[in-house]
Image (cartoon, rainbow, N blue to C red):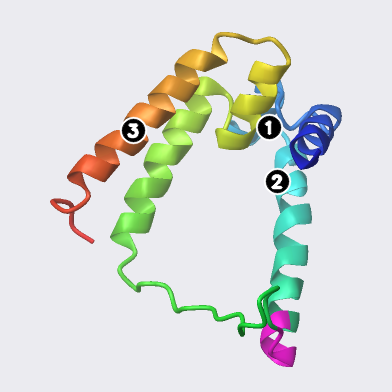
Amino acid sequence: MAGILFGIIMTKSEAVSWYRIQEMFRFQSIFMYGIMGTAVIPGIILVAIIKRYHLKDTEGQPIEFKNKDRRWKKYGIGGCIFGVGWALTGACPGPIFVLLGQGYTVMTIVILGALAGTITYGLLHNRLPH
């Protein structure tokens, strides 16, 4: 049910639109940045609440946030690879499945490419600088 709701929201908000994504990457519209902001801002607020009130998960364990690694190169390189894939395909991982569900069967190629990249990373991850 959550996946169906996600698909409906992504479709109705036009977040799966190739044209909207291209507008974002060409800095022609702030539409997609607004959609992302509506996810980031509540996330920041919820994390602050969790930290302030020391909330626990469903099993009664305290929710802990670990500090991120300060080596920024891996985040920059990974983000660039992700961004190039997003710009070329017109979809990031969530919308890929929404578009496939809408009948755009060409997205199977994108899904296979994403899986191939994930498998490649899994095989090479011990040899990569972390």
Q: Is residue 76 above or below residue 55?
A: above
| SS under mark 1 | loop
Which numbered disc covers residue 33? 2
Q: Quadrant of the N terminus?
A: top right
Q: Residue 111 location, x and y as percent?
A: 48, 23
Residue 115 located within the stretch drawn in magenta: no
Most foreground residue, 105 or 129:
105
Is label 2 or label 1 in front? 2
Q: Is residue 61 left or right of residue 120?
A: right
The kind of secondary structure element at disc 2 is: helix
> Which residue is label 1 attached to?
28
Amino acid type, mark 3: Gly
Extreme residue toward the bottom, this view: 53
Magenta highlight range:
50-55
Q: Earlier in the sequence, mark 1 or mark 3?
A: 1
Name the image quarter holding the C terminus: bottom left
Q: CA distance from mark 3 to mark 2?
A: 26 Å
Question: Are there few (<14), some (14-19), or many (20+) residues within 10 Å of tag 3?
Answer: few
> If you read the primary sequence from the N terminus, does the residue marked by circle 3 or circle 2 appear first?
2
In the rendered structure, which amino acid carries the disc numbered 1? Gln
